[in-house]
Image (cartoon, helix red, strand yellow):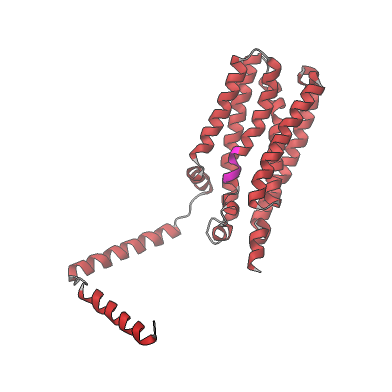
Amino acid sequence: MNKADHKRLEAMLVNHYAAHQAAAEPEMVDDVVTAMLAEDARMVKARHRNMGFAAFVAAQVGFVPAWTWAVQVAIVAIMCVVAFAGDDADAAKLTVGILSAATVLVGIPTVHASKLHGVAELEYSCPNNAASVMVARLIVLGCSSALAVLLMVSVTAAYLDLGVFAVALWAAPPFFSSCAGCLLALREAMPPTATALCVVWTVTCSTALMALSAVFPEMYAEASLTVWAGAAAVALAWLAREVSMTLLSAWEGLDAFSPYMAKTYY
């Protein structure tokens, strides 16, 4: 299409839409202006209304997919079945550790959703930026995972007629180690690869737990609780380091939080 044809087509379209344009009544114009002013006033008020941190954290619950909660409930239900429907106490002791590690995987897609979907840069432009979102989601998913583990520990303790503290020591090292390893993978690896590495790491933790139980049948005896306590302390220290490193990278900005995305801009 040459320039003359383009101009002629443009003129025809202008005339067409002008002929079908409805005349606006003065009252309609006034109504539209009033609505626009009201919306502008509402947005100004919303911008000046500060959301507290607790409210912001609570708001993140709505962004967690429903299947996350469903899977966590299913994991707890599996533990209940293993504990009360089975006759093997050793299997219940081992299962509580494996399922505690598995609860971590449920929240992985939500924790690094901004990097996984490539919107980390957009989040950094918001008042509550990517660092704030990361903190809030870690709190929400950390609390939900901890609650799931607590429920499984309580069920197992009730079935085995043991103290909750002893069962918690069996669940804590695999849970803390799985959390720490997954945070390390999410921080260092590219988003699609990080998810796969989290699965591999959690499976590795579970496999190591099964291998140790096969090699050391007495590892779940009461005499071994001191060793479990030491393992839990070491795993918790590692987890604390990984949480601090993850939050530090988020607060440092896009280059540190999502270096693979940042490189595309240079």
Residue at 79% x, 30% y: name it.
230
Magenta highlight: main SS: helix
Q: Residue at the front extreme?
A: 1
Give the total number of marks visible in the rendering: 0
* Residue extent of the magenta highlight: 106-110
Q: Residue at x 69, y 27 (%)?
A: 97
Query: In which quadrant of the rendered image does the C terminus lie?
Result: bottom right
Up/down of 125 relative to 73, above or below: below
- The quarter of the rendered structure image containing the N terminus is bottom left
Can residue 245 be seen in this snapshot? Answer: yes
Say left or right for 144 vs 266: left
> Is 148 contained in the magenta span?
no
State whether residue 209 is above or below residue 4: above
Q: Nearer the viewer, residue 125 or 265?
A: 265
- Position of 226 relative to 249 (above/below): above
Depth order, front residue of 36/112: 112
Residue 109, located in which quarter of the rendered image?
A: top right
The correct choice, above or below, for 225 with respect to 234 in the image is: above
Looking at the image, which residue is at 73% across and 34% down?
A: 205
| Residue 177 image offset from top left, x and y in percent | 72, 37
Q: Position of residue 67 (x, y in %)?
A: 51, 37
- Describe residue 140's horizontal placement relative to residue 175 as left or right: left
Residue 253 visible in the shown view: no
Give the quadrant of residue 140: top right
* Residue 142 place in picture, x, y as percent: 61, 39
> Is 21 situated left or right of 121 in this image?
left
- The front one of 250 and 200 is 200
